[in-house]
Image (tube, helix red, strand yellow):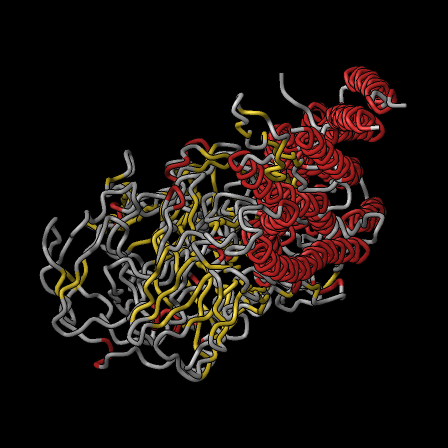
């Protein structure tokens, strides 16, 4: 049995009660704060982990508000572009309407007025601002009005910037679109090339939009389709002074587009002529050594003309050249003729496809000799230019029979309609991109919410106190302390001195 | 014979009286700390032989001894030193633990809010209120760092006070022990009549004083033959020798005047005690706590503050503010604290600079000079980095910082204490309160001409870190030519492009970065399949148009026998002239191009036809190591256009990683003649590129050599301090319980049990009464004898 000193009895009891009290205080603090970890020393690993998790949680909350910000910008842009779509559809129906042949100039002028006001509405939409006065479509330059009229037409004053928003830890989405991409950067024509009638055309040829046959063969050069031929001329140096009439076409189907020469032979007082196809180098069948009768019609290959005697009769070797009508295609970039490969022209057939350089266009109507059509690589044409060009066309394009009977208007309307379709497509493409971004945001929103819930659960597991356990601990510690106090009181009064009298 | 009865009874009564007195002494001192219970040592008096045998003569009082077990006492002493150490350390570290653990108002939350604020700026870059909110968040972070640092400094100065108090106490105890040594020596009465008796209470007092010293610092004792005890601290430094006591002093450390060292005076000189000599006890705890917990915590906090401030500054400097100016510093970042050793004899004045926050540690460093070489010692693990014979290179980065002798020279043996991050949290400050100064935008912007016919698009571009060669002196984080406008024009065919600029210095930049000249006989070897470009400044000499090479086969060597314009440098550009910097192949897959694709030098051919030798990666092109026999003026380069494949959709090019300090990616299929330009960003109030990058700093592993983010470092700090506090709390509790056991054991021997003393009282009372009875009996016997005579 160990001897005990009296002070040990007091000291150890006091120390024991002190320890119990401090445990109780800690449990009580845990209950009152609701936290298991009062300071990092209570569970250093969990405390450090909790800091990391609460940072992630806070970042996740921030991403939620980033997503909300992006969503509201995108929704605003989407609703603006919805209006733009409606407006463009209205413009398109006006343009279709303007093609109605029964319209008078004043009818078209009033359509032009209507289009002009629609154009102003469109400019207003393109210059939309958000609630804070920032322009939606000016790229990074949100304080700069993106679209304004200049001498060169409607110009873009913003930049190409697209603002991104961090919508999750690893994902950024663009929350804005540059006005240049929405309204300006729209390829005209069919996207690869644009076919247009020459401005001085007098014939009634109307060119279509065309299509690409072989993308690999597309050169990116610009081409001219030039109509010509149906000419006749005396060769310089003829002895005979007789003249040739301008040829006429008797059968369009028989026209070859080739060049011909008519050569006289005087033999034994008999004047004959022969016709040679100079393009092929072959004599024209049935036209060799024909007896010449002044003023008699000469017909071959769908052409008809006559040659009349002059003061001096024809001698052997006198020659006239005759060309049949058709078109040639020239590559302007390389300055070479691509169609046909030989001299002469290709005969024109109304509506028949004209192919070169991997591309194909068709011309309808009757182009006049000297009319040209250009085929150039597609360039960017802004929505504003398309509409304002259309307005100009409708205001000024008074068609007269003399200059092709309204084909200039038809060609321009064709071009405008194609461009309007392109504009509409471009706006719809941007809108579908907006839509997919909005979709992504809302799917991330759900993920972010569940992630946030998970972070909060982890945090709670890491640092929150288990109330049931803490309260039961407290009760137990209280009982222990009470027992220690009572037993100490009992033990400390025991002393032999009490019995010394 | 009868008188013997009196004598014996008297000795019995005396002994009982001694017993009672000693018992009373025990009872009185029952609660006196350090008191050992005393016992009267009795022995029977020497019996007298009366012939009939030896008759007892009573009892002799041999002495009064204290009940004392040296082994148990030594155990308690040892245990208490350790317990005192642990509990002092625990108390001290709990302060930091509580300070850092405050989860709602701590730096951690403030940093989080700072990044959230930057996200707010990114969402609304032109909005002044959101910028203002960020500045508010920034101020809160700064305040958070400063307030914790302030409290750590307060703890440090409190610690200095406690260290001084401890030293005062040790001195006082040492003097008392020395005084007691003399008293004990006297009282033991060596050589006098008193010799052989122990002055028990003095011994107890001395033991108690040694115990007190031991609770401050661990000591060892050696008893001397004259009764005195020598007390030693550390490795045998005598604190008390006989009646002499050493006086310790707390003096500012020679290496760091902000810290107190313990020293003693010897021959008028202060001799500093090594810290390893001052183990155990509260003093040992304070010194260890200061060096192992407090200062590292302050440095760790400072490292986070420096990391935060510097990272934000650097990113902000890569951006453009709301006024269109290049971004500046948002925060003040602390510089390393450099303290010369007080014993330095040289004249050097040393300054430090933070070079790379990711390399920073929380350690302190010592810069040493041995007369020939400089070296840097990382004090946490004593790693030595040699800095050579000097002069110290500004680019010699040790753990993310550099040092520089700004004036004077170090003498052999001189040293400087470098604390790179110690003042980080104290010195962090917000440098601007102008919301416009937040550089949310990037300084450059790419744009595609509206007249482009291809489908190529250009990204807005990002800014690169500066080249080591030519940073912009005004904005050292960016390239000199960053804002110079550059035009990228696609050639025909669009598989190559050319860079042009109306800015003369860009050509100069290219010239300086990559020499445009090839010496008369130099051998040019194509380094790789990466497309070699032949092309030239329009007004350069170089190859004339139509330079021809007969045939190029794999493995031949390019011998360029020419000089450019007859000079080693291209002609100086003329103002307003358009300089063609060169032609570059358009490459699929975003392969980066440098300004030169020929090893070390660009081979240039002045050709209006933009002759291209080599081909896009997808083409056949030149294989690696392609060489060309000889090129002379007037020969023609024959290349087959068919060898250059057409650009395919989805291809992208990256314009030189180093070009003007930016990267802008072009993707899609540009057409011949398409023009893209990259130049200074303007009016870009809606640009948030740089703000996104700043907000992204949150998750980047900026610190600890790219292994930890700022937030992770903070949680690591909290975790480190927490686990040290936990360790100290747990071991302190265990040690206290162990000491309680030891004390109980020691007290079971030396402690006073009052019940036992009560019993002793009764025992001695009974003995006294019995002896008195014997005396009464003897008196009665005498009376009987005397009455016989009547």
Q: Quadrant of residue B435?
A: bottom right
Expressed as whole percent of the image width and height from the top left, the position of residue B429 reads 69, 64
Q: Is residue B278 left or right of residue B135?
A: left
Res. A87 in view: no
Asked if A234 appears above or below A248 in the picture, the reply is below
Q: Nearer the viewer, residue A208 or B697?
A: B697
User: In the visual, does B730 lie left or right of B661?
Assistant: right
**Image quadrant where one finds the N terminus of chain A:** top right
- Residue A427 lies in quadrant: top right
Front one among B685 and B617: B685
Residue placed furthest toward the front: B790
Examine the rendered structure and indicate whether residue A232 appears above or below residue A103. below
- Residue A416 is drawn in which quadrant? top right
Asked whether residue B9 is in view, the answer is yes
User: B20 and A301: which one is in front?
Assistant: B20
Residue B244: percent from the left, percent from the top? 54, 64
Residue at left offset 74%, top offset 40%: B103
Residue B614: image location, x then y, percent = 24, 52
Image: A216 above or below B414: above
Q: Does A112 sit left or right of A354 as displayed?
A: right
């Amino acid at each position: 049995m160990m001897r005990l000193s009296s002070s040990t009895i007091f000291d150890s009891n006091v120390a024991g009660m002190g320890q119990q009290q401090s445990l109780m205080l800690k449990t009580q603090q845990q209950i009152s704060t609701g936290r298991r970890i009062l300071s990092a020393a209570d569970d250093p690993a969990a405390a450090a982990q909790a800091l990391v998790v609460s940072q992630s949680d806070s970042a996740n909350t921030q991403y939620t508000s980033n997503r909300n910000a992006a969503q509201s910008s995108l929704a605003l842009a989407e609703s603006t572009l919805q209006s733009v779509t409606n407006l463009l559809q209205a413009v398109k129906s006006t343009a279709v309407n303007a093609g109605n042949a029964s319209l008078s100039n004043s009818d078209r002028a009033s359509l032009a007025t209507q289009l002009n006001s629609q154009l102003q509405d469109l400019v207003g939409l393109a210059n939309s601002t958000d609630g804070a006065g920032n322009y939606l479509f000016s790229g990074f330059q949100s304080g700069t009005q993106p679209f304004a009229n200049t001498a060169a037409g409607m110009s873009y004053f913003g930049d190409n910037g697209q603002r991104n928003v961090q919508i999750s830890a690893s994902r950024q989405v663009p929350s804005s679109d540059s006005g240049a991409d929405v309204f300006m950067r729209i390829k005209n024509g069919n996207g690869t090339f644009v076919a247009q009638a020459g401005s001085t055309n007098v014939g009634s040829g109307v060119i279509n939009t065309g299509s690409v046959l072989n993308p690999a063969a597309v050169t990116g050069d610009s081409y001219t389709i030039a109509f010509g031929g149906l000419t006749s001329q005396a060769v310089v140096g003829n002895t005979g002074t007789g003249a040739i009439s301008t040829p006429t076409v008797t059968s369009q189907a028989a026209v070859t587009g080739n060049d011909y020469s008519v050569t006289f032979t005087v033999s034994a007082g008999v004047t004959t002529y022969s016709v040679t196809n100079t393009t092929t180098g072959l004599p024209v069948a049935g036209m060799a050594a024909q007896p010449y009768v002044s003023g008699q019609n000469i017909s071959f290959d769908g052409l008809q003309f006559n040659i009349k005697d002059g003061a001096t009769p024809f001698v052997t070797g006198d020659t006239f050249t005759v060309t049949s009508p058709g078109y040639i295609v020239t590559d302007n970039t390389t300055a070479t003729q691509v169609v046909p490969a030989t001299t002469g022209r290709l005969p024109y057939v109304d509506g028949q496809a004209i192919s070169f350089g991997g591309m194909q266009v068709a011309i309808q109507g009757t182009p006049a000799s000297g009319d040209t059509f250009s085929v150039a690589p597609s360039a960017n044409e802004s929505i504003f230019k398309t509409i304002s060009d259309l307005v100009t066309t409708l205001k000024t394009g008074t068609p007269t029979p003399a200059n092709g009977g309204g084909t200039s208007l038809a060609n321009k309307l064709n071009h405008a309609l194609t461009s309007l379709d392109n504009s509409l497509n471009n706006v719809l493409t941007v809108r579908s991109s907006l839509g997919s971004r909005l979709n992504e945001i809302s799917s991330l929103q759900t993920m972010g919410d569940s992630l946030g819930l998970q972070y909060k659960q982890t945090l709670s597991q890491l640092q929150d106190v288990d109330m049931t356990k803490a309260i039961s601990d407290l009760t137990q510690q209280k009982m222990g302390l009470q027992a220690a106090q009572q037993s100490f009181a009992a033990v400390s009064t025991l002393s032999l001195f009490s019995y010394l009298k | 014979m009868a008188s013997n009865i009196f004598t014996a009874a008297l000795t019995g009564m005396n002994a009982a009286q001694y017993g009672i007195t000693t018992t009373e002494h025990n009872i009185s001192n029952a609660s006196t700390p350090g008191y050992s219970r005393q016992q009267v040592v009795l022995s029977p008096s020497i019996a007298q032989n009366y012939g009939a045998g030896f008759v007892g003569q009573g009892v002799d009082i041999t002495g009064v001894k204290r009940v004392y077990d040296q082994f148990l006492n030594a155990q308690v002493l040892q245990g208490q030193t350790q317990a005192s150490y642990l509990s002092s350390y625990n108390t001290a570290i709990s302060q930091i633990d509580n300070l850092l653990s405050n989860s709602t108002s701590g730096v951690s939350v403030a940093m989080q809010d700072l990044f959230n604020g930057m996200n707010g700026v990114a969402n609304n870059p032109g909005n002044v209120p959101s910028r203002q909110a960020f500045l508010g968040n920034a101020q809160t972070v700064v305040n958070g760092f400063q307030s914790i640092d302030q409290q750590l400094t307060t703890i440090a100065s409190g610690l200095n006070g406690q260290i001084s108090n401890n030293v005062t106490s040790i001195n006082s105890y040492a003097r008392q022990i020395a005084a007691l040594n003399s008293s004990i020596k006297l009282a033991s009465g060596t050589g006098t009549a008193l010799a052989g008796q122990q002055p028990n209470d003095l011994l107890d007092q001395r033991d108690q004083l040694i115990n007190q010293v031991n609770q401050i610092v661990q000591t060892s004792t050696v008893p001397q033959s004259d009764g005195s005890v020598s007390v030693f601290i550390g490795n045998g430094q005598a604190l008390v020798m006989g009646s002499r006591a050493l006086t310790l002093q707390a003096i500012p450390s020679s290496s760091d005047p902000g810290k107190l060292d313990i020293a003693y005076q010897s021959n008028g000189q202060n001799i500093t005690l090594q810290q390893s000599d001052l183990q155990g006890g509260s003093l040992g705890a304070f010194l260890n706590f200061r060096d192992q917990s407090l200062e590292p915590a302050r440095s760790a906090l400072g490292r986070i503050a420096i990391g935060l401030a510097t990272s934000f500054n650097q990113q902000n400097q890569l951006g453009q503010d709301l006024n269109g100016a290049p971004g500046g510093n948002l925060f003040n970042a602390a510089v390393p604290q450099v303290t010369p050793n007080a014993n330095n004899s040289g004249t050097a004045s040393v300054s430090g600079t933070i070079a790379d926050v990711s390399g920073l540690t929380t350690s302190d460093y010592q810069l040493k000079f041995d007369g020939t070489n400089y070296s840097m010692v990382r004090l946490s693990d004593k790693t030595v980095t040699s800095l050579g014979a000097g002069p110290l290179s500004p680019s010699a980065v040790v753990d993310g910082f550099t040092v520089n002798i700004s004036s004077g020279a170090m003498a052999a043996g001189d040293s400087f204490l470098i604390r790179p991050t110690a003042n980080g949290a104290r010195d962090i400050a917000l440098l601007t309160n102008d919301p416009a100064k937040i550089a949310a935008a990037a300084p450059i912007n790419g744009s595609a001409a509206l007249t482009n016919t291809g489908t190529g698009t250009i990204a807005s571009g990002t800014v690169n870190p500066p080249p080591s060669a030519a940073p912009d002196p005004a904005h050292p984080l960016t390239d000199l030519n960053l804002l110079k406008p550059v035009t990228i024009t696609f050639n025909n065919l669009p598989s190559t492009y050319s860079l042009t600029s109306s800015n003369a210095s860009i050509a100069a930049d290219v010239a300086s970065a990559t020499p445009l000249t090839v010496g008369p006989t130099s051998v040019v070897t194509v380094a790789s399949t990466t497309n070699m470009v032949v092309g030239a400044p329009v007004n350069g000499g170089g190859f004339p148009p139509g330079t021809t090479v007969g045939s190029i086969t794999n493995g031949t060597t390019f011998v360029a026998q020419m000089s450019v314009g007859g000079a080693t440098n291209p002609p100086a550009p003329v103002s307003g002239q358009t300089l063609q910097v060169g032609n570059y192949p358009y490459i699929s897959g975003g392969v980066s191009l440098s300004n030169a694709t020929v090893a070390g030098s660009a081979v240039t051919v002045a050709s209006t036809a933009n002759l291209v030798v080599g081909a896009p990666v997808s083409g056949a092109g030149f294989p690696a190591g392609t060489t060309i026999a000889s090129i002379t003026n007037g020969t023609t380069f024959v290349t087959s256009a068919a060898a250059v494949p057409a650009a395919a959709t989805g291809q992208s090019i990256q314009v030189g990683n180093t070009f003007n300090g930016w990267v802008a990616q072009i993707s899609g299929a540009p057409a011949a003649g398409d023009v893209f330009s990259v130049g200074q960003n303007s009016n870009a109030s809606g640009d948030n590129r740089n703000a996104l990058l700043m907000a992204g700093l949150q998750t980047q592993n900026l610190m600890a050599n790219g292994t930890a983010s700022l937030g992770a470092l903070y949680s690591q700090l909290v975790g480190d301090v927490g686990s040290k506090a936990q360790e100290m709390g747990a071991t302190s509790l265990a040690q206290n319980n162990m000491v309680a056991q030891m004390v109980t054991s020691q007290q079971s021997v030396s402690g006073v049990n009052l019940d036992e003393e009560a019993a002793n009282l009764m025992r001695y009372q009974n003995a006294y009464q019995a002896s008195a009875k014997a005396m009464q009996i003897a008196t009665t016997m005498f009376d009987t004898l005397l009455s016989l005579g009547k």
